[in-house]
Amino acid sequence: MKLRQVTFISIAALALIFLGIESYVSNFIVKNGFDRLESDLVAADIRRARNELVREIDGLDTFLLDWSSWDDTYEYAGSGDETYVESNLGSGTFDDQSLNLVIIADTHDRIIFGRALTRDGTESPALLNRMRRAGLAPGLPPIKNDGSGVGGLTVLPEGVMLFARQPILTSDGHGPPAGSIVMGRLLDEDMIKAIASRLELPLAIHPVSPALPPEIKALLKGLTVDDHLVKPRNGDIVDAYALLRDVAGKPGVIVSVTEERSVSRQGRTVAKLNFLLVAAVFIAFSLLMFFLLRRRVLSRVERLNAQVRNLDHSASATVTAAVTAAVTAAVTIDGNDEIAELAREINAMLRQIDENRTRLQAAHDDLEEKIVERTAELVKANRELLWLDQAKSHFLSSASHELRTPLTSILGFIKLMERTFRKRFRPLLDQDGSLGEHVETHEDNFRIIRMEAERLGRLINDLLDFSKLEAGKMVWQEEEVTIPTLVRDATDVFSGQLDEQLGITLAVEVIQPLPILRVNKDRIHQVLMNLLTNAAKHTRQGFIKVDVRREGEAVLFSVEDSGSGIAPEDRERIFDVFYQARHGASQPSQSFGTGLGLAICKEIVEHYGGRIWVEPGPVRGSVFTFSLPLSLTVKI
C-alpha cells in the first residue's frame, strides 16, 4: 500500500474516530444534560402540585381555627342551642365556603351537630357516618407542626375528602375544650381546575382505589420508595407523579402532571448542531492537513522514490563505474528539510553500495576459484575413500573366506583330540590318582580352545554376512512361513543353549490371528537368535520373554529380559557396526561378541521395510522390538 493511501486512510480513520467520540459527547453528554435538567424541572413542578394540595388542607385548617376558637361555638358545644345552627350553619355557609362536611362533637365524641353533603349538594347520612369515624378517630396526624389542628385526606366512595379537626375553645383561646369541630371538602373537578390554574400546570388527581387505572397502579411501588417519579412517555411528552398519603399513612392519592418536552427537544437540537459544526470543522481541518501533507511530504517522497527506481534500472544497464556515478548524482530533491537530507543520504549510500559491489564481485570471483579447487580436492578424496571402502569390503570377504577353511580344520581337530583324550587317555590317567587335577585342567583347556574356535567362527560368519549385506550381494530366498513356526524354531534352538544357564525361564506369547509372511526364514531366524542370545548375555537370573502381536499395519516381534538392562547412552548406538554395550553383563568374564550381531539384525529388518529399536523394561532389563510390515503378508 502506498504512502498516499496510508496517509488518506489514517486521516479518514482518525476523522471517523473523532466523529464517533463527538457523536457520543453530543448525544449522550449534552443531550443527557438537557434531559436531566428537564427531569429536575418536571420534578419541581410535581412537587409544587403536591404541596398545593397540602396547602389546601392547611387553608381548611386555618379557616376551621376561626370557628373552633369562638365563644359562640364554645357555648353551643356546652348548651346545644339550635339558634347557633340556624344563624351560622345554614346552607349558605356550606355553599359559600365550599364545605361538604361539618361535625361538632362534645368531649365524649358524641355528635351535637353533623351534616354531610355530596358533590351535588345532597345530604348523605352514610358519608356523615364514615366521616364521624374518620374525623373523630384518635391519633390523627397534625396538619401543622406548630398548630393544634389534625387531619389530612381520606379516600371515600364519594371521593377524596380533605378535612381538619380542631378543639373547641373560647375566643381568646382558653379552655378547657368543650369538644371538637370537624370540617371537610370533597376534592372535585372545580377544585382541581382551580389548583391547576394557579400552578399553570395540566394537573390530574388519581385516588388510590380498586378503580385506579393499571398504568397508574404500576407506579405505586416506585412512588412508595421515592416521593415523586418522572417518566417520559415519548420524545415529546413527559409525565410526573407524586404520592400523597391519607391520615392512616397509606397511599391516598397520586398527583400527576403532563408536560411537553421542550427542554429535551432543545437539547436534541443543540446536540445535533454541535455535532454538525464540530464535524464540519474537523473534516475541513483533515482535508487541509491531507493537502499540506500531499504537497509538502507525499509528492516529494513519491518523486524521490521514482528517481531511486529509475536509478536502479539505469544502474542495472550500466557497465562502468563512471556511468553508475553519473546516475547516482541524478537523485536530487529541492529544499533543506528532512526529505532533502534523505535524498543526500541516499546518494551517499548508493556510492557506498557501488564501492561494496566492486569489492563483493572481487571476493565472489576469488571464492569461486577456491570452491573449484576445494571441489576438486573433495572429489579426489571421495574417490580414495570409495576405493578404500571397496578394498575394506574385499579384504573382509577374502579374509573371512580364507580363515573359514583352516578354522574349520582346527575346530574339527580340537573336537577329535577332545574325544580321543576322553576315550583313550583319560581312563589310563584316572588309574593314577595323583594325575586327576591335571586331567581336569587338560579337559578345561580343550573346552576353552573349542569355545574360542566356535566364537571365532561366529565372528567370521558375521563378517561374511555383513559384507554381503553391505555390498548388496546377499541372496534372499523368500518362502511362505507362518509366524508361530518362526518363533518355535528359534526358541527350540535357544532352549538347548539356555540349559547351561540355570535360573532363567523362557516364556513365549504369540497373539493370534497373525498373517503368513513371505520372507527369508533363515534371516528372520538369525534376527530372533541374535536378540535371544543378547538377552541371555545380560541376564543372570529371571526370565526371557518372546512376544509376537499384530499392531496397526505391522507385526511386532519383542524379546524382553529381566537382566541388567542397557544404559541410556548405549541405546542410541547399540545398532551401530562394531559397537558393544559394556554395561551389565550377566557374567563378569562373559564375552560381548563382535559388535556386528545387532547391526546385521538392523540390515535384515530394514531390507524388509521394518525397523528395530530397544526400550527399557517395565521394571528392569530391556525390550528389543522389530517390526515387519503387512505388505509382506501372503494371507491373513
Image: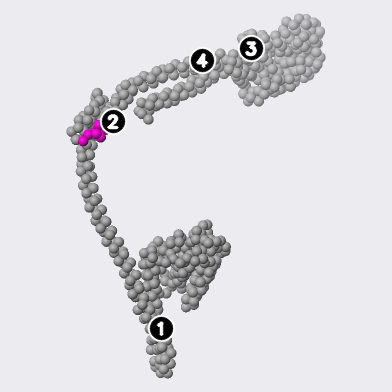
- Residue at label 4? 269
The amino acid sitting under disc 4 is Thr
Q: Which disc number belongs to residue 202? A: 3
Q: Where is residue 169 in the image (x, y as percent from the top left)?
A: 72, 13
Q: Distance between the residues labelled 2 and 3?
A: 80 Å
Q: Residue at x 79, y 5 (%)?
A: 86
Q: In this view, does 608 lie to the left or right of 220?
A: left
Q: Distance between the residues labelled 3 and 1?
A: 136 Å
Is most of the magenta stretch helix, strand or loop?
Answer: helix
Q: Which residue is drawn at 35% across and 20% down?
A: 291
Q: Which disc number belongs to residue 415? A: 1
- Residue at label 2? 309
| Mark 1 residue element | helix
- Asked if residue 316 is among those painted magenta in the image, a careful observer would answer yes
Q: Nearer the viewer, mark 2 or mark 4?
A: 2
Q: Quadrant of residue 382?
A: bottom left
Answer whether residue 143 is visible to the viewer in this image.
yes
Q: Is residue 408 above or below residue 114?
A: below
- The quarter in which the C terminus is drawn is bottom right
Q: Nearer the viewer, residue 440 or 487?
A: 487
Q: Which of 580 and 464 is in front in this view?
A: 464
Range covered by the magenta-colored residues: 312-319
**Mark 2 touches mark 3? (CB < 8 Å):** no
